[in-house]
């Protein structure tokens, strides 16, 4: 055991030096450079400037020293404690959505011989995506000075990602906290896909698929939508070709995962015995617990996307609650009227659908808008899961498509219709001509463009990635493995004994 | 000696146990089982997908009794387990060759 620690320590030390070498190189020549051209020393701020910095913190705006040509330093250095604390809690809440929220929600819905496979896939994705994120993923999404479609390698290996804010994204939240917060989104997105392919895809195939999918679909899409000069970042990028908006990930998270899930589950084929033997959820109790955790975690997801504990976060918190609660109630009542019984899975599915649909909208709409979203989110995905799946006969095991793709697409569209200047003052910055406070404002067209790009990218890339994965490791386990259950066959463990 | 096996609805167990106690039965073995007879199963619906569940949960009571207790026991079970609806269950009576108490090696009725 000791040996292992020593080896690990050595490896870490070696890695550290190799990473730091390029950064250290200029240090040798630094004194010479300083002697040649001494940087002009910045002045201390006067009282007026010090008060302005305090106001900037409270109002979540830039402090004087943030300007490139600033001639003064700030007495308030680094991140702001309130915003930073809020963001760390939100990051933890978003992780809580995947571990354990999503794996309990999904795990309860599979047969008991496959619950651990879902847990393993969620943990596997959390580790794999974190590795990619550290190596280059974060930089591919939020790299400084990148183009409008792809990021770059500026922040690879978290180079320069420290506790000081990256003012492109937040004046008061640490760059590293922002990066870890965004990592949690990158983790849950591919984890959503496993709902469609549950119970019948090899662990190795899922890891290979997700590794490729992150690079080809998620990183570029997240860059286009949220990168400061992204193609579809309508709120912050004045030069965006498509003036679309997406507060917390309707396109990036739910549409991308949902549409990819549909294609992957079709390529993969149906579960053995699908339609012939019963495949009902093995534990609605676990599923309901998972749903509660998802709902709680979603406050970090939606309110946290304001990247500040400000009024926009407060509004997102409010709209998220209303949409989730209304959709949960409406879905179950629709079942009550049409099928005779309000089911637990109905309440759970409705809550998740409401949260999905409000995700892109939550920071841009009024509480009234979220009420409308709640009603539609309780009805449309309900019919998608009930009728659409039966009509086309694909085996979307846990309804990732029905909830996330249908809900996400509807959410992106409704965001275009319901975004209001009164809900978010930032809409007036670059979108004055697009958000005119009416249902069919010009923003709707921009949202449709973003929807089309997201669907096309997700579908085309998933077909290619699935075929590559199939060629390298194969997609499905042997029939006897699938029959025995993935838990025992692939992980050597059982979720339940006796 | 006879073995009395009764398959009953789970929520009738307490009443059956009390009724058997009243006629002097001092022990029984109870198992949770699944099965179906004329009652058939039921349908479960998850997000619109319907599943027919054939096997319903039931309770099986097993007792080995001296011959003179059998009629009273069967009557007690029937009286306490009957709801009059389909699915109330069944009682089976069969002969037992031998019974041995492990602790004392007593045989026959002595061991019951």
Image: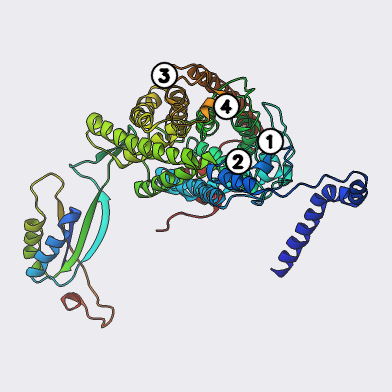
Q: Which residue is mark 1?
A: A140
Question: What residue is drawn where x is 46% and y is 19%?
Answer: A436
* Closest to the observer, A232 or A135: A232
Q: Quadrant of residue A252?
A: top right
Element under label 4? helix
* Closest to the observer, A394 or A69: A69
Q: Are marks 3 and 1 in contact (CB under 8 Å)?
A: no
Q: Which residue is mark 4?
A: A458
x, y (%) of residue A216?
Answer: 65, 31
Q: Which residue is mark 3?
A: A438
Element under label 3? loop
Report the Cα–Cα distance between label 3 and label 2: 30 Å
* Closest to the observer, A45 or A121: A45
Quadrant location of the C terminus of chain A? bottom left
Report the Cα–Cα distance between label 3 and label 1: 36 Å
Q: Which residue is mark 2?
A: A170
């Amino acid at each position: 055991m000791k040996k292992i620690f020593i080896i690990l320590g050595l490896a870490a030390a070696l890695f550290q030096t190799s990473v730091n070498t390029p950064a250290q190189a200029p240090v040798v020549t630094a004194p010479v450079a300083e002697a040649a051209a001494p940087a002009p020393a910045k002045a201390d701020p006067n009282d007026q400037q010090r008060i302005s910095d305090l106001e900037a913190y409270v109002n979540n705006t830039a402090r004087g020293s943030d300007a490139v040509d600033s001639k003064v330093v700030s007495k308030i250095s680094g991140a702001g404690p309130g915003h930073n604390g809020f963001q760390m809690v939100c990051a933890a809440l978003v992780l809580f959505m995947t571990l354990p929220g999503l794996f309990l929600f999904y795990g309860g819905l599979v047969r008991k011989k496959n619950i651990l496979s879902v847990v393993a896939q969620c943990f596997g994705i959390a580790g794999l995506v974190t590795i990619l994120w550290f190596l280059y993923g974060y930089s591919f999404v939020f790299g400084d000075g990148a183009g409008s479609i792809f990021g770059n390698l500026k922040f690879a290996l978290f180079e320069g990602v420290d506790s000081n804010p990256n003012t492109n994204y937040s004046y008061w939240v640490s760059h590293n906290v922002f990066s870890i917060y965004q990592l949690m989104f990158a983790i849950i997105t591919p984890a959503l896909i496993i709902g469609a392919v549950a119970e019948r895809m090899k662990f190795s195939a899922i890891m290979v698929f997700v590794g490729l999918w992150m690079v080809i679909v998620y990183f570029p899409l997240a860059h286009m939508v949220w990168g400061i000069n992204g193609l579809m970042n309508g709120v912050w990028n004045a030069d965006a070709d498509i003036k679309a908006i997406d507060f917390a990930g309707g396109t990036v998270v739910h549409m991308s995962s949902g549409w990819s899930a549909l294609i992957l589950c079709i390529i993969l084929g149906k579960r053995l015995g699908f339609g012939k033997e019963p495949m009902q959820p093995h534990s609605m109790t676990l599923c309901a617990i998972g749903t509660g955790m998802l709902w709680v975690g979603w406050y970090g997801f939606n309110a946290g996307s304001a990247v500040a504990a400000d009024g926009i976060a407060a509004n997102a918190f409010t709209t998220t609650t209303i949409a989730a609660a209304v959709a949960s109630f409406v879905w179950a009542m629709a079942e009550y009227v049409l099928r005779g019984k309000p089911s637990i899975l109905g309440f759970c599915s409705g809550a998740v659908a409401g949260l999905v649909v409000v995700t892109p909208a939550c920071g841009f709409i009024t509480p009234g808008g979220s009420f409308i979203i709640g009603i539609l989110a309780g009805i449309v995905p309900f019919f998608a899961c009930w009728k659409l799946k039966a009509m086309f006969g694909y085996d979307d095991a846990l309804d990732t498509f029905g909830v996330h793709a249908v809900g996400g697409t509807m959410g992106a569209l409704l965001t275009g219709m319901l975004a209001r200047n009164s809900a978010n003052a930032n809409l007036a910055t670059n979108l004055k001509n697009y958000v005119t406070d009416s249902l069919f404002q010009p923003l709707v067209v921009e949202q449709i463009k973003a929807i089309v790009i997201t669907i096309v990218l997700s579908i085309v890339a998933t077909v290619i990635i699935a075929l590559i994965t199939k060629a390298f490791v194969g997609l499905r386990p042997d029939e006897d493995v699938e029959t025995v259950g993935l838990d025992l066959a692939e992980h050597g463990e059982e979720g339940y004994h006796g | 000696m006879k073995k009395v096996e009764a398959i009953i609805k789970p929520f009738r167990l307490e009443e059956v146990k009390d009724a058997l106690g009243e006629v002097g039965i001092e022990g029984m073995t109870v198992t949770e089982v699944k099965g179906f007879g004329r009652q058939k199963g039921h349908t479960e619906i998850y997000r619109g997908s319907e599943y027919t569940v054939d096997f319903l949960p039931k309770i099986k009571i097993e007792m080995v009794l001296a011959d003179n207790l059998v009629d009273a026991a069967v009557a007690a079970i029937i009286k306490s387990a009957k709801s009059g609806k389909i699915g109330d269950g069944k009682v089976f009576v069969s002969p037992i060759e031998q019974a041995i108490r492990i602790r004392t090696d007593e045989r026959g009725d002595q061991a019951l």
